[in-house]
Image (cartoon, rainbow, N blue to C red):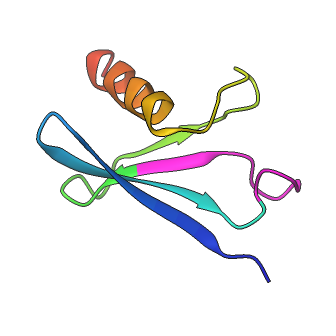
Amino acid sequence: MSRSIKRKIRILNNDYYWVLDGNSLFNNKEQHIRIYSKELTKSTLYLDPYNWDLEIRPKTIETAILFAIEHG
């Protein structure tokens, strides 16, 4: 059984959570990272680390969130 990994990151005085579900990096079920804020419950950012050869680390998540905020 696989578990979800949920991490919190604080950007521009807002808390965001990024979630990597179980073995989503190694199976065909889900291959993305979900990023969301509890304040903006209807906004979810899906990040596909494979198409861009991204390292899965807090700096990469921060860059993706800031890009999404700047570009609406």
Location of residue 53 in the rendering, given as x and y in whole percent from the top left corner: 73, 23
State the residue in front, 5 or 70.
5
Main SS of the magenta segment? loop
Of all residues shown, which one is farthest toward the top?
A: 71
Would residue 52 be counted in the magenta stretch? Answer: no
Of all residues shown, which one is farthest toward the right?
A: 27
Quadrant in which the C terminus is drawn: top left
**Vertical placement of residue 60 versus 30, above or below:** above
Location of residue 31 in the rendering, given as x and y in whole percent from the top left corner: 74, 47
- Which residue sits at x=11%, y=41%? 13
**Highlighted magenta segment, given as a residue range:** 24-35
Of all residues shown, which one is farthest toward the bottom?
A: 1
Would residue 29 be counted in the magenta stretch? Answer: yes
- Which residue sits at x=66%, y=35%? 48
- Which residue sits at x=28%, y=25%? 69
**Vertical placement of residue 70 versus 45, above or below:** above
Q: Quadrant of residue 17?
A: bottom left
Q: Is residue 69 left or right of residue 21?
A: left
Quadrant in which the N terminus is drawn: bottom right
**Vertical placement of residue 67 versus 43, above or below:** above
